[in-house]
Image (cartoon, grey):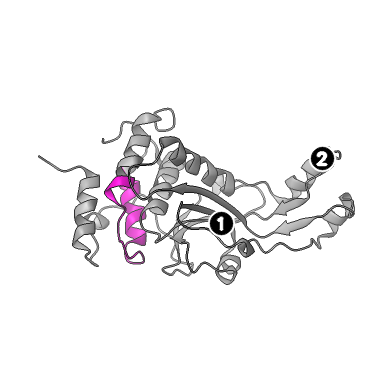
Amino acid sequence: MSKTFCEELYDIKQKNSPDLPGFCAVKKPWVRPTNLPESNIMTPIFQIPAAAVPSGLKEQYIYVGIGYGLQQNLISPNNIAGVLNVAYDVNDPADLQNAYNPTDPSIKKILDFELAVWCFPSLLSKVGLVDGNENNMMTLVSAIYMADQLLNFPSLTEQMEETTTNPGDPMTNFYQQGNLLIHCHDGGSRSVTITALYIYYKFFVGKCTFQEVYQEVICCRYEEASNHVPTQGICENAYEVLNTFKELFPEPVRK
């Protein structure tokens, strides 16, 4: 009996081999960003297509990485405006947001500074997953939508316009736009899986299979992640999401 893709990944994991699996040699669904610094903590995986980049930005990227060791001096230089933590067992330090008083004169012009007004270079969000097949499917779907929300956060101008049109309930926290980091504990299983689901859902349904997208994200992080590949359990969860929420993923997928 032939093995499922998730069972094949489990076999690779058991071998714990540093060699790239054979599927990494197949044709790539996209060209991986190579003009950005990478490390075991943060690896650039995907450049958002120009047509999908929100107003206010010229380009935008998705990174995948680890939660421990994540520091502000890695967030700011890489323009990470959204941090999505998908590990139930990792908490991000609050100082990654590094709030500061705004100096933009356009903000001062429209706001009453008797209010406590703050700007944040990054927005922390968490949708915690177990690294196995015990997750509720809605938790994975929530992580997909949260990734989309963080990548499409309104520009500072739009945030200020919202404050102007709602003077009775003004915004007092302003967030930057930029790149997205999706991380878990090791950056090779849960974060890889959610990243693949999001990229497939948003950009590749009908163009290629989920397995091809999943393979590419795995290969991008293979050498940086100590566990190399996702666990069989979280992989099975991904395919369960694909088959349960067909309105998100209308193309047939391999079970």
| Residue 138 location, quadrant | top left
Report which residue position mark 2 lands on.
169
User: Number of numbered discs present?
Assistant: 2
Magenta residue check for 167: no
Would you place residue 134 above or below residue 45 in this image?
Answer: above
| Residue 205 location, quadrant | top left
Q: Amino acid at mark 2?
A: Asp
Q: Residue furthest left?
A: 1
Would you place residue 250 above or below residue 99 in this image?
Answer: above
The reply to whether discs 1 and 2 touch (Cβ–Cβ < 8 Å) is no
Report which residue position mark 1 lands on.
179
Left or right: where 236 falls relative to 2 = right
Q: Characterize the local packing of mark 1: few (<14), some (14-19) or many (20 or more) Cα atoms within 10 angstroms.
A: many
- Lower position in the chain sequence, tag 1 or tag 2: 2
Q: Amino acid at mark 1?
A: Asn
Q: Which residues are magenta?
A: 211-234
Q: Position of residue 174 (x, y in %)?
A: 73, 52
Q: Characterize the local packing of mark 2: few (<14), some (14-19) or many (20 or more) Cα atoms within 10 angstroms.
A: few
Q: Quarter holding the N terminus?
A: top left
Left or right: where 50 falls relative to 64 = right
Q: Which residue occupies 62% across, 61% down?
A: 94
Q: Which residue occupies 79% across, 62% down?
A: 101
Distance between mark 1 and mark 2 Cα atoms: 28 Å
Q: Which residue occupies 60% across, 46% down?
A: 152
Secondary structure beneath label 2? loop
Question: Where residue 105 is drawn, which disc sits there?
Answer: none
Q: Position of residue 253 (x, y in %)?
A: 30, 34
Q: Quarter holding the C terminus?
A: top left
Nearer the camera: disc 1 or disc 2: 2
